[in-house]
Amino acid sequence: MLFDLDNFKDVNDTQGHDAGDKLLQDLASRLSFFRKTSETLYRLGGDEFALVSHDLTEEMALERAKVIREKISQPYQIYDSLIQIGACIGIVISDGESRTDYLYKCATWRCMKRKKRVPATFRYSVPDCFSASRRINPLKMT
């Protein structure tokens, strides 16, 4: 599961890079506290994170993504400002695929495809990500 923050550049531009860095630290802390022991959280760079889970069904992965997106969208107290962000999430169910670079490309492609159309949504993908996918209906952000 890969997630990319929506409009993070705006935080850096309006609040400054220190505020952006603090937001990323707070987000990582929030997700680290929330993650399951069987999951590994990675910051891939910039405003992109990955959460690797094992033995999840499609339904479980979708439910997990909903909860993670809700956690991400909760407000952050950054210095004197209250900041709320969203994220697009790309989900890939590997079904035995072991090439992590390929899985990463699939998740990134799905995430960016959604982000261009509707921020703060999911995109689910099977391993053959460039030819088969299912659109997940956007969940409204508050």
Image (cartoon, helix red, strand yellow):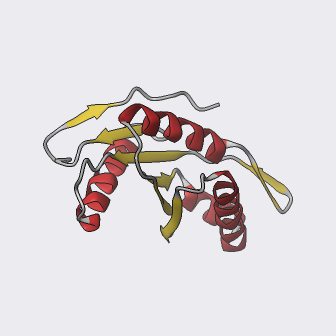
Q: Is residue 43 above or below residue 70?
A: below
Residue 47 appears anywhere in the view: no
Residue 86 vs residue 117: left or right? right
Q: In the rendering, at what x and y percent does residue 52 appear?
A: 45, 57
Q: Is residue 54 left or right of residue 38?
A: left
Q: Is 138 in front, or is 40?
A: 40
Q: In percent of the image, x 17 and y 38: which residue is there?
A: 132
Residue in the picture at 56% in, 58% down: 8
Q: Residue furthest left?
A: 131
Q: Residue at x 52, y 40 (%)?
A: 64
Nearest the viewer among 62 and 26 is 62
Q: Is residue 100 visible?
A: yes
Rendered-image quadrant of the C terminus: top right
Residue drawn 46% across and 41% down?
119
> Which residue is at the far right?
80
Q: Residue 79: percent from the left, percent from the top?
A: 84, 63
Q: Is residue 90 above or below residue 97?
A: above
Question: Which one is nearer the viewer's eye here, 62 or 141?
Answer: 62
Answer with the quarter of the image where residue 86 lies. top right
Count every numbered label the image shows and give the total: 0
Residue 139 on image: x %, y %: 51, 28
